[in-house]
Each structure stands twice: as C-alpha cells, then as structure tokens.
Amino acid sequence: MVNASRMAGVVEELRERSAAEANVLLGDGGRSEATTKRDSSGAPAAPTGFRTPFRFESDDTLLVIDQRELPHALVEEPIRNAAEAARAIRHMVVRGAPAIGQVAAIGLALSARQARSARPYARRAILHGAANILRIARPTAVNLRWAVDRLMARFAEIGETSPDGDAVAAALYDEAMAIVAEATDDHARLAEAGLAILPQPEAGPVRVLTHCNTGPLACGQFGTALGVVQAAHLAGREVKVWVDETRPYLQGARLTAWELQQAGVPHTLIPDMAAGPLMARGEVDVVLVGADRVAANGDTANKIGTYTLAVLAERHGVPFVVCAPLSSVDLATPSGADVPIEERSADEVLMIRGIPIAPRWTPVLNPAFDVTPAELISAIVTEEGVLRPPFGKSLAAAAKRRSRKRPPRAAPEPAAPEPATPEGATTDDATANGAPAEAATS
C-alpha cells in the first residue's frame, strides 16, 4: 500500500525531475509555450533521453509531450484546464489509458484552481461541465472516467457548494497527484509481477512480441507491458523485443521503438502481419500487451490488432499476457460486448503524416480498438499479482484486495443536465475561467 509519506515522496520527485528534464532534453529554460529541440541548422532534432509523458512547468501549467510529433521532434504543449486536457486527449497529443487518466485528473484539478474565486454554484457548474467534457474525450479507455469520477467524488465529499474555493482546489489537486503517485507504485509492482512469469529460454534472450505502446509515454512514470520488459532488462535478463508497427497510427513504430532505443533494449520493428510467421517459426516466447479496458469476465479491449495476435498465439501455443493496472479493470462492464469501441478519422488510414496512401474518397472503417475474449488470454498481470482464469473470480478478488488498501470514495451523484451548446460553438470552447463548453455527444 502507498502510504502518505511514500506518495509525497513520489510527487516531490516528479516535480524535481521536471526542471532537470527540461534543461537536458529541451534546453528551454522552462518556457510555458510549446517547444522543439532543434539542431544547428534549425531543423527539428531527434530527441534523446527516456521521458515520461508530462511534467509540471508551474503550479498552473502542465506540459505534455505531443506524441504525434515523435520520434522526429520533442514538442511540448501546455495544459492549463480541463478543456485543454480534453483537447489533448481527443487529438492524441497524449495517449495510453493510464496516462490519459492522469492528465485528465490534473486538467480537472487545474480547472478547480482557475475557478477558486468563483461563487459556489458557479464553481459547481464549472467543474461538472469540465468533468463531462473529459469523460467523453475518448470512450473506450476506462481510466479516463475512473480518474474524473474519483476527483468528482472528492469534490462531493468537500461539499459542492462550499464557499472555500481554495480548499476545493487544493483537495482536487492533491487527489490528482495521488492518482499519479499511486500509478507510479502500481506499475512498478506490476512490472515485478510480470518479470516473475517471463519465460526463461535455456539459451539466448527471451523473445517478447508487443503491440502498440505501453511504456512511460502511455502510462506515466513506468510502463505496463513495456514496464515488464524494462524490469527484465534492468535485472540483467537477456531480452529481444519484436515491435509491431501498429497500423494505422503507428504507435509501435513511432513510440515503442523510440522508447526501447532510449532504454537500450534490443528490439526489431516488424510489420503487423509478420507476427504470425514469427510465431510459426518458434521465434516468439511470449506476447505482452496492455489494455484500455478489462471487462469483469476478463475480455480485454486494446489497440486494434490485439485480437488477431491472441488468435495467432493460441494457434501456435505462445502465452498471451495482458498487463494492466486495476484502474483499467471495469467490473461494471460484464463482457467485451459491452465495451464502447471508438471509431476514429478515415484520414488515419488514408494518409501517413499527411501523405495520401489510398485513392481519394475511399470508404474507410477505422475502429481504434478490438476485444480479445478471455479464453484467449493466458494471464492478466496487475499490481495485485498475476491473475489466472477464471478471470471473473480472480479479477473480483484482486479488486477487493486493492479496495482494502485504498478504500474507494463514494460515487458522485449524476450531474444536473447542462444547457445545449450554442450554435457555432465547439467542444473545445472554454469560458474565461477555464470551464469547457458542453460537449455534443456523437
């Protein structure tokens, strides 16, 4: 269990590392605007150093790496309120279920800080509006709603019409930082548990195949599936990683390959469809993937292409392991059939970095995620240990153990209906005090 002193230490370490990382990686002197490290010719330089996805510039500004620009340039965007956090999440500036939850929590806390001088009922409307726009920024990753609901439950505990705006802001900020600190501890323990079950070949490295991106960029201070890989590397285990490119957004090619390069872990980038032949030749010892949502029965939603890997792994007798913190487990969702699957822009399939790769007006289906049935999953690695089938029982037991360590807050009451968005307004609009406009539902 993370106690108060441990949590405070993690948060303080995060703050202290921020300034050092800014100087080493950006050389920006702590400016709040987006920055890019450039070479002597003025062109964007390839970034160096192993990085978390966000850092604090000040108490009022969070800087997040624009993951759309990697690996070619290290660019940071400022987030000062929930509206800016929602925009960054929706537009994939920040991505990865755990990181999305952490950034959403901080964004909501920053909106509370901006609204601390507002009248109590106005502040209540501001924060409920902010929470609503964050919840719908991306529908599949459960960490987002979980983190927002947790802060809103804290708001309800204080009293939503409390006249003390400073106390509200401080409490929500502390809750957001607790989420960051707990994730740091949880993911470290998850990595240790995953390391214990990695196959140990008689000769040569353990050959891991991974999909999408599950390192610190996606998760915060540690990774999940990639955290297990790094734990093995740091423990002196020989590791070789097969990195799926992960079409269409290329998270594997752009992000995972970059992170492994920074960490010094041997790896090879492969086309997604090369995974099957590699398994057939016996060149994969284990498949490690993350999860955006794990249903109560163990069905797992993850980046599109994960289900295909699970079927191939089953066919070739390769262990298929999901690595996910319990904040990604949604016991209120009975099965994968109940998970909402996000549909993304056709342009992500039709183009790569703005260059067309298909005839114009080609019809496109672009689901961002798929669902892997529980029967294809060998194990689910969490901060509460390695869970085995039947997952309905093992997930519930793990959640119960975790709740004894960190009792959940009471769920907040549903927010009152908000007025419709005025014609011509967008979901990115914000009021002068940082409150997001009501978002249109799709």
Image (cartoon, rainbow, N blue to C red):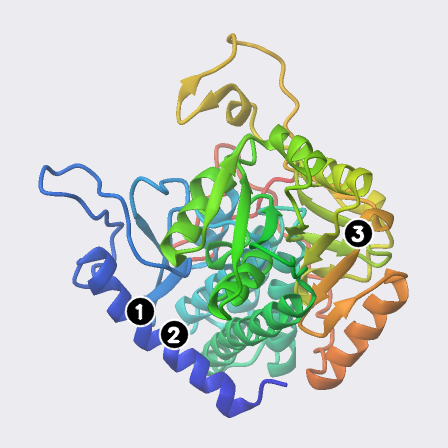
> Is residue 193 toward the left or the right of residue 77 in the image?
right
Left or right of residue 155, residue 317 in this image: right
For this orientation, the residue located farthest to the left is: 40
Would you call the spot at circle 2 few (<14 residues within 10 Å), some (14-19), or many (20 or more)?
some
Disc 3 residue type (three-letter): Ile
Label number found at residue 377: 3
Q: Residue at x 70, y 65 (%)?
A: 197
Q: Nearer the viewer, residue 361 or 10?
A: 10
Q: Secondary structure at mark 3?
A: loop
Front residue of this view, candidates 30 and 234: 234
238 to 90, vertically: above or below:
below
Kind of residue at badge 1: Ser
Q: Amino acid at mark 2?
A: Leu
Find disc 2 in the rendering and name its residue.
Answer: 14
Q: Residue drawn at (34%, 75%), measured in percent from left and top?
A: 15
Q: Is residue 367 above or below residue 262?
A: above
Task: Give the alpha-carbon distance from disc 1 to disc 2, as whole Å.
Answer: 6 Å
Residue 293 in the image: state x and y as whole percent. Answer: 71, 53
Residue assigned mark 1: 18
Q: Residue at x 74, y 68 (%)?
A: 386
